[in-house]
Image: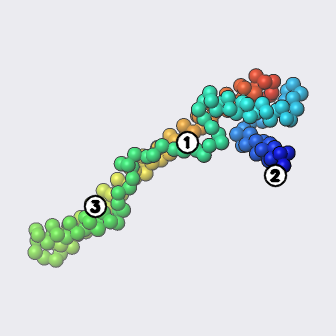
Amino acid sequence: MKISTTLSIVAIASISFINIASADLMVFPAKGQSNEQMEKDKFSCYGWAKGQTGFDPMKTPTTSTPPPSQAKKGSTAGSAGKGALGGAALGAILGDSSKSAKRGAAAGGLVGGVRQSSKNSSVDQKTKEWEQKEASNYANNRNQYNRAYSACLEGKGYSVK
């Protein structure tokens, strides 16, 4: 491969890289800078803004791991089944008739299902809160990066919107 071909590939990759890094910002050369100079300045400001904020818009977003206590432990149906078995056993012990066992099973199933459903709702709510917090953190970090990137480019004579 020729050196000029390699340089062309690197230049195209750099331009693509810079455009992704500043995807939501419009940059205009207010002092007549050439396209080549503008791309160099964008790359320079990308590195500076990343260093200032610790945020890299080119990096795949990551999140913190939700606490293990937020993982769902069982299904409503499974808990209802366990409750029904316990209720049937209790009904059979307390009353010798199969009617008592059936009533105990129904009551145990209902209580077990309601408890698990309530637990799952709480887990779902905590998960939603965690997701919102992560999205908010990403948006705040991206905003800080954009502010630093814009400040750098404006300092080099560009109009940034």
Tell me the kind of residue under disc 3: Gly
Q: What residue lies at 87% left-to-right and 29% top-to-bottom? A: 33
Along the line of sight, the residue nearer the viewer: 142 or 59: 59
Q: Residue 118's image quarter?
A: bottom left
SS label for mark 3: helix
Label 1 sits on residue: 135
Does residue 32 appear to the left or right of 147 in the view shown? right
**Which circle's residue, 1 or 3, is located before the other in the chain?**
3
**Going 86% across and 35% down the picture, which residue do you hit?**
35
Q: Where residue 89 sits: x, y (%)?
A: 17, 69
Residue of label 3: 112
Give residue 45's position: percent from left, percent from top. 72, 30
- Distance from disc 1 to disc 3, alpha carbons, whole Å, reads 35 Å
Gap between marks 1 and 2 measured at Cα: 44 Å
**Residue hosting label 2:** 1
- Which badge, 1 or 2, is on the more N-terminal residue? 2
- The 10 Å Cα crowd at callout 2, few under 14, some 14 to 19, many 20 or more, is few
Relative vertical location of residue 55 with respect to residue 105 in this rendering, above or below: above
Does the image show residue 77?
yes
Work out which residue is located at the far top of the displayed protein and give it.
Answer: 155
Q: Nearer the viewer, residue 25 or 6?
A: 6
State the SS at label 1.
helix
- Lateral position of residue 74 relative to residue 14, left or right: left
Q: Is residue 39 above or below residue 3?
A: above
Disc 2 residue type (three-letter): Met
Mark 3 vs mark 2: give the one in front: 2
**Residue drawn at point x = 89 percent, y = 27 percent:** 32
Q: Is residue 8 visible?
A: no
Cα separation between marks 3 and 2: 70 Å
Residue 126 pos. (x, y %): 42, 46
